[in-house]
Amino acid sequence: MRDWMERADKVFMNTYGRQPLVLVRGEGCRVWDADGREYLDFVAGLAVCNLGHAHPAVAQAAAAQLTQLVHVSNLYYTTPQTELAEELVRLSFADRVFFCNSGAEAMEAALKLCRRVAQERHGPERHRFICMENSFHGRTYGALSATGQPKFWAGCEPMLPGFSFVPFNDLSALDAAVDDTVCAVVLEPIQGEGGVKMPDLGYLTGVRYLCDERGVFLVFDEVQVGLGRTGRLFAHQNFGVAPDVMALAKSLAGGLPMGALLATEAAAAGFVPGTHASTFGGGPVIASAAKAALAVLSDADFLARVRWMGDYVDEKLTDLASRFRAIRVVRGMGLMWGLELTEEGAPVVAACRERGLLVNCTQGNIIRLLPPLIIDVPDLDRGLGILEEGLRVAFP
């Protein structure tokens, strides 16, 4: 395995602080490394593998489409793409869909769309975005400019103009920031990369009211928190608030790269032929995989089980926090949880990995748990047991 890592380090740009693992196979909630060692995966490709690894329905749909039609570009209609878009419209607030390849691309499309509509209606002065501190929307320049974590800007400044930031969960600050130069408010209903930060009771309702009152679009980034992760198909459904525009990606195609922009009819009017495009967006193979994934992720019984599992995890992690002073707070819902520590989280990640569990640390001190949504109780208990061992090793 060490040989593979050395070979990789000679040829790849140094953009990732990778874990010392070479993964070669995955099935369900498990992955195996090049030495044959098995790991329980509580990262799930950073919430991409919501249906676990190599889900049979997704694999079969993609394989079948590979023998029929792989790519023709969006110069033409294809049946898998149309059927997928119809399902997304049926299941959501949206009237229109645009397909792309990633969450960052979906966010770029969202920003362009909001500016176009606002300027067509109100003139060029209506171009600014109000975004949230501690947010994360992607690595491309538009998405990065909307990201409220300056550490991601380092070495890339200046960011694009027209982006301002207010604290998440602060309606008063948002109220003061939205003036007649603003075209949209952009936020994650739950901040994922920011550390699984939850909205306060009534916050999203207040944001929706403010956007309606001021005539600005509300954009939700559900790239990480959408598609069943919280126990609802879309995270905003937990709070009774719908956006005008929403970005999806990560688990949309069951592990294959796909992004989508969903919008109401009024918002979608900003795009006409020639204003935006994606060569690979919604290609037949990816769309076929996504149809299969969405059929599982949108099933009512499946989502109810995720909610039940979320309550189960909540109890387990609350008990764990009562026994470890190093755990400052536990937060999350469904199968998306963060343990904010009083110390650095890297030793916990390493200790868990050595014991056969993969977890992630964000913000330096927040252990993020994103197990596949198909996980069963025995595997969940096993993973949480290893996490407890990892905490004991890191904080004796």
Image (tube, helix red, strand yellow):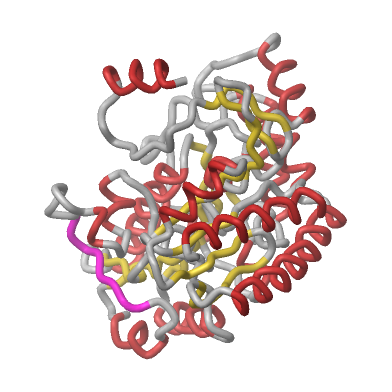
State whether residue 251 appears in this view.
no
Residue at image location 36% in from the left, 54% down from the top? 111
The magenta span reads 160-167
Side (left or right) of 311 relative to 329? right
Residue 345 image position (x, y, % from top left): 43, 59
164 in magenta: yes
The number of numbered badges drawn on the structure is 0
- Asked if 318 appears above or below 148 in the picture, the reply is below
266 in magenta: no
Front residue of 69 and 393? 393
Which residue lies most toward the top here?
67
State whether residue 206 appears in this view.
yes
Which residue lies most toward the right here?
301
Place residue 296 in its image quadrant. Answer: top right
Residue 386 image position (x, y, % from top left): 64, 53
Front residue of 277 and 33? 33
Place residue 60 in its image quadrant. Answer: top right
Residue at image location 47% in from the left, 20% down from the top? 1
Residue 42 image position (x, y, % from top left): 61, 48
Residue 294 image position (x, y, % from top left): 72, 43
- Asked if 342 appears above or below 11 in the picture, the reply is below
Side (left or right) of 233 relative to 178? right
Place residue 72 in its image quadrant. Answer: top right
Residue at image location 46% in from the left, 68% down from the top? 218
